Amino acid sequence: MSLRVAAFYRFAPFAAAELPSLRRRLLACGEEAGVKGSVLLAPEGVNGTVSGPEAGVEALLQELRADPRLAALREKRAAAPVQPFHRFKVRLKREIVTMGDPALQPYLATAVGAHVDPQEWDALITDPRTLVIDTRNAYEVALGRFEGAIDPGTTSFREFPAWVERELKPLVDQQRPEAIALYCTGGIRCEKATAHLLQQGFEAVHHLHGGILRYLEERPQAGSRWQGECFVFDQRVAVNHRLEPGEARLCHACRRPLTPADRQLPSYVEGVSCRHCEGQRGPLDRARFAERQKQMALARRRGEAHLGRAFPQR
């Protein structure tokens, strides 16, 4: 049976005291509906990706939309042949996407960049007067990107403001672009990134509404400006233009995505090392990783899941 995957977020103001009760309701709803995945709650809103039966996913989304502040919550859906998550978690956080700037208020429409729908995106980014920026991490960019986009080379979204100060400001002063266009996986990082740029005095700031996932959903592959696969933060690792699981796999030692070519390198030992982490672990860690990989292989032969044991929620 094919499972439904739903990725969603909504910036909305919440009091910190409200969040524990919302967490309890979502945990009860998700467990009853047979949904797995992760939901983050913070004073600035909600962010999550879940998977399960169509009816179960819909029940969880309806539970969220029951709050008037989340009534306009939109999701991006895809099918998954197997469950891409091990358990269901609802966590309370300071931010639903961490940039480390508490002054930002992305839930105010005037505080973020102009939304650009997928149908209008190609024209914007192919205009030579537009500066296109990928706000994702470098390991995500390595799997796929829009042609010509700038890769800030970050390993964490927290590094984006420093990159803006160090590199983007001088670049904009030099090139004087007529528009700045940002994109990310689902749109949430761009909401904060464009809010930060506007706060810093940048003008004509835009971002891809719904992110890469909505673009892949709505734009046909023929003539698409997207190249490669899109990294996703679950066991699918990456999806192709049809939103099906792609060819990338995770290194279980460092959690970095690997292309088929990466897995052909001598540095790749399944579950133990890859080109990103070769030489970074000592003999004890490598032995532990090798034993874990052995147990995973044995579990697969028995038709069992080695990962995903359910622990009580605190």
Image: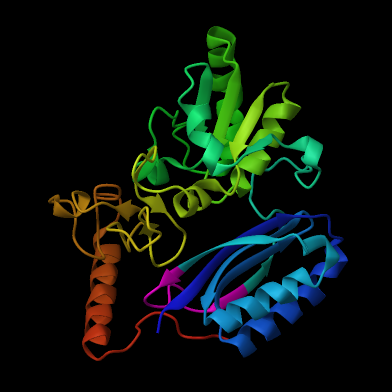
Horizontal arrangement in the rendering, residue 15 relative to residue 289 (left or right): right
Identify the residue shown where x is 52% and y is 35%: 121
Q: Position of residue 19 (x, y in %)?
A: 80, 68
Q: Position of residue 109 (x, y in %)?
A: 79, 41
* Marker count (numbered): 0
Q: Position of residue 98 (x, y in %)?
A: 64, 48
Q: Position of residue 33 (x, y in %)?
A: 61, 86
The extreme top residue here reads 174
Residue 249 on the magenta span: no
Q: Nearer the viewer, residue 72 or 35?
A: 72
Identify the residue shown where x is 61% and y is 62%: 75
**Which quadrant would the N terminus be assigned to in this image?**
bottom left
Horizontal arrangement in the rendering, residue 110 relative to residue 292 (left or right): right
Residue 103 visible at all = no
Identify the residue shown where x is 52% and y is 16%: 129
Q: What secondary structure prevails in the magenta region?
A: loop
Horizontal arrangement in the rendering, residue 114 relative to residue 247 (left or right): right
**Would you place residue 48 above or below residue 193 in this image?**
below
Horizontal arrangement in the rendering, residue 292 relative to residue 129 (left or right): left
Q: Quadrant of residue 57?
A: bottom right
**Which quadrant would the C terminus be assigned to in this image?**
bottom right
Residue 15 visible at all = yes
Residue 84 on the magenta span: yes
Q: Quadrant of residue 299?
A: bottom left
**Would you place residue 89 above or below residue 255 in this image?**
below
Which segment is the magenta one? Answer: 79-89
Identify the residue shown where x is 48% and y is 37%: 154
